[in-house]
Image (spheres, rainbow, N blue to C red):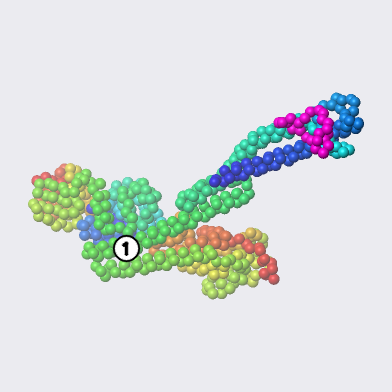
Amino acid sequence: MRILVVEDELGILEPILALLRRERYEALGARNLEEAWSLLAEGEPDVLILDIMLPEGEDAGFRFAEALRQGGFRGGILFLTARDALEDRIHGLELGGDDYLVKPFHLEELLARIKALARRHADFKGRILRRGSLEVDLVARRVILGGREVTLSPKAFALLELLAQHPDRTFSREELLERLFPGAETDAVLRVYVQKLRQSLAPWVVERVPGGYRLGKP
Amino acid sequence: MSLRARLAYAFFLLAAAIGLLSLLLGYLVFRNLVERDIALDLSEVTGRVLKALEITETGPRLRQGDVFLGTHYVFGFRLSRDGVPVLEGGFAPKEGEAWRTAKVPWKEYVLEVHLRVEEYRRALGTYLRASLSLLLPLLLLAALLGSYFAGVLSRPLQELAQAVESLSALRFPKPLAPVRERELARVIHSFNRLVEAVRGALEREKLLTRYASHELRSPLAVLRSQVEALKGGLLPLEQVLPHLEGALARMERTLEGLLALSRAEGDLEVDLLPLELTSFLRDYLKGQAGVRFRRLPSKEGGPGPGQMDPGPAEQAWILAHPLLLERMLDNLLENALRHGAPPVEIGLGGGKEEVVIEVRDHGPGVTEEALPHLTRPFFRERKEREGLGLGLALVEQGVKRLGGKLELENARPGLRVRLRLPRWRGEAANLSR
């Protein structure tokens, strides 16, 4: 899952990115809106964590969120800001924000909210998805096969996570490429990660169907 | 006792006193008249009797012709000698009736004449009863009127009392309606002003607390997330440490800024003195490198730009405190030099009623979006810029203390800050001589 953090204060941005990367998210950081736009051009994030007061202005974060929603951005938006006034919270949620967290905050709470946001956009709302001997813990972000934990690379986990969040849906190759490997020229990279998942777990885990891939059954 | 009851009571007492007094006076005057009539009647009757008395060998007797005929008086007489009655005639005084007696010596006798004055007594009694029966409704009316007027007078007081009560609980009452009574009207105006002043002060306090808490949230967020990242092994100590130090330094600066603001509140109590701005600015600018003085074109045709020496016509007197004004100008020049670009100019001008000090730079100015927020404590147009964002807030506070107005506008290029201060006319002429 791709998460974009827009925060001009390096002292806050760095710990968040470190935390998200430890949790095997694909985390990107931007310190101003210019950087944020250029990262967005490379692919839409699933969750956007957004400060409101940015170098571009007092309400730059609000304006950014509004523009994104008007442009059809479907991911979750979490405002992370020092502005604690009720009207700001309401304004943020009305503009299309999904959540609002006031600074100072606990990293663990931020993480829990990000996971809740990710779940909101998933078809599968539970915590652990089970398929035969495979267990995908979407909160702890662990994979267990036959009672044994399997460590996956972030990209491989992201692929499995996306399939597990929508267990009955078939993803086209184009959509998977856009969401997981933005900027990739061909679908070769996708085929590599499908192969990796099948090798690390079991051949049935990723099922190839006409038009794309979906989570398989044993 | 409520004010209303007290006023009604006072009205009642006053009316009672006036009523009783007039009753008493009327009664006395009436009785005097009656007494005079009685005395006249008595002397007339006595004269009649005396005229009819004569002495014979057998003693005194009444002359022929009835002394009691042809008169409406009811009277009688008794002639006695050494206390022994010798002759009596007419009516004798009856128990339960009002009679008057006159004693006159006649030869060696004493003549007592009795006159019935029952009619007079009845007339007095009727007068008294009539007056008294009128007094009672009068008193009642007075009490009612008193109560009504007391109600009218005390209503604003009651409203005021309620309003004061809610104010003391920090619930802000609506402005009280004006009244016609001059003394009360003053109290009510003062009270309405007090409510506004308290509300304003609390609002400012609340805003400042909000800005300050907001200002502290960012460094606190850095501290917390860095410490948590350190504890969770997300970041190494050497990467965390500079951020912790930076956040602590920022919190210290914020604290200093807050103290500066509260010190500035103390400035509101300094005494203001007459100050001539042209010479004040000349002295002030001696210590400021890179700042140009400029005469602002004035509607009344002031001197041209670049002239520094104040002529008698160019004096700009205001009421201010030199240190306060200096600190305000320091802040403005610091802003202009730090965020703007040279040349930085200080201008002086104004009209009949006001004096205008203008500070202008030739930098990029500010965005129109940021313009209305510039005087907000801790506002910074760009977060990465240094400074606390308190300078203009302090200047605005100072300008308000001097009874003036602060105006900000983009001069393209640069930012133009204008202090509009009321021109002081007081003893300017005397002082300048």
The quadrant of the image that shows the C terminus of chain B is: bottom right
Is residue B223 one of those drawn in magenta? no
Whole-percent x, y for residue A208 in the image:
14, 46
Q: In this view, does B83 lie to the left or right of A118?
A: right
Q: In which quarter of the image is residue B48?
A: top right
Question: How many numbered circles does the render carry?
Answer: 1
Q: Is residue B350 visible?
A: no
According to the image, label 1 marks what residue?
B222
Name the residue located 51 percent from the left edge and 63 percent from the top edge.
B395
Farthest residue in the front direction? B58
Q: Which of B229 and A9 is in front in this view?
A: B229
Residue under the point 63% across and 65% down: B317
Instruction: Point out residue B206 in the picture as x, y percentages from the top left corner.
Output: 44, 56
Q: In this view, does A190 lie above or below B392?
A: above
Mark 1 falls on what kind of element?
helix
Span highlighted in magenta in the image: B79-101
The residue at 59%/40% (across/down) is B147
Asked where in the image residue B129 lies, by quadrant, the reply is top right
Q: Residue at horizontal 61%, vertical 38%?
A: B144
Amino acid type at circle 1 is Val
Q: How crowded is mark 1: few (under 14 residues within 10 Å), some or many (20 or more)?
A: many
Q: Position of residue A108 (x, y in %)?
A: 25, 57
- Disc 1 sits on a residue from what chain? B
- Where in the figure is residue A64, as x and y percent of width and height? 36, 52
Q: In this view, does A95 lie above or below B353?
A: above
Query: Do we see residue B290 in this rendering?
Result: yes
- Looking at the image, residue B48 sits to the left or right of residue B4; the answer is right
Quarter of the rendering containing residue A81: bottom left
Q: Which of B252 and B129 is in front in this view?
A: B129
Q: Nearer the viewer, residue A129 or B126?
A: B126
Left or right for B258, reference B233: right
In depth, the one of B191 and B10 nearer the eye is B10
